[in-house]
Amino acid sequence: MEKFHLIGSPKTPEIDFNGDTGILELRGRSIPENSVEFYSPLNKWLDDYEKQPHASTTVDVKLEYFNTSSSKCILDIFKRLEKMNGKATQVKVNWYFETEDEDMAEAGEDYQAIVELPFTIIEVDEI
């Protein structure tokens, strides 16, 4: 399966999803002007990935900050992965947050409470 890669910018995260390894990674900031438009190609890629997912899927979220519209798009991604989990793939989420960034830690906990996916909340010195 082809890889999905978007280079990050000051307003958009770097996205690196490798269907062959099952590793999906979001890094940086997510404050695009139009979140739905920005995340649309990723959702199309997930349509294809759902047809032939890797046996295990690991989602590494390393975001410094995201806005409200991005939070909805991220939730939509988690919900799609939740539907795949336990069928053809086992999904797990690693949510990284910087030390003393309680807002990002709580955001990870909020997603963990909303979707039925195994989450690991990981504190790091720097993202």
Image (tube, rainbow, N blue to C red):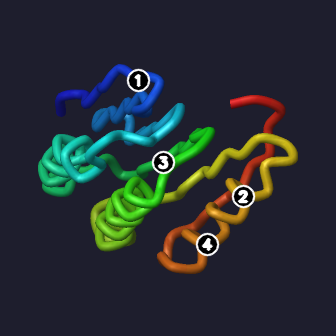
Quadrant (top left/top right/bottom left/bottom right) for the C terminus: top right
Real-space Cα separation, disc 2 to disc 4, in angstroms: 10 Å
> In front of the other: label 3 or label 2?
2
Real-space Cα separation, disc 2 to disc 1, in angstroms: 22 Å
Q: Nearer the viewer, residue 21 or 13?
A: 13
Of the numbered discs in the image, which one, if any, rests on residue 110?
Answer: 4
Residue in the picture at 29% in, 26% down: 5
Earlier in the chain: of badge 2 and badge 4, it is 2
Of the numbered discs in the image, which one, if any, rests on residue 59?
Answer: 3
Residue 90 seen: no
> In front of the other: label 3 or label 1?
1
Q: Which residue is mark 1?
A: 8
What amino acid does circle 3 point to? Val
Q: Which residue is mark 2?
A: 103
What amino acid does circle 2 point to? Asp
Dot 4 lies on which element?
helix
Q: Nearer the viewer, residue 21 or 115?
A: 115
Of the numbered discs in the image, which one, if any, rests on residue 100?
Answer: none
Residue 125 placement: quadrant: top right
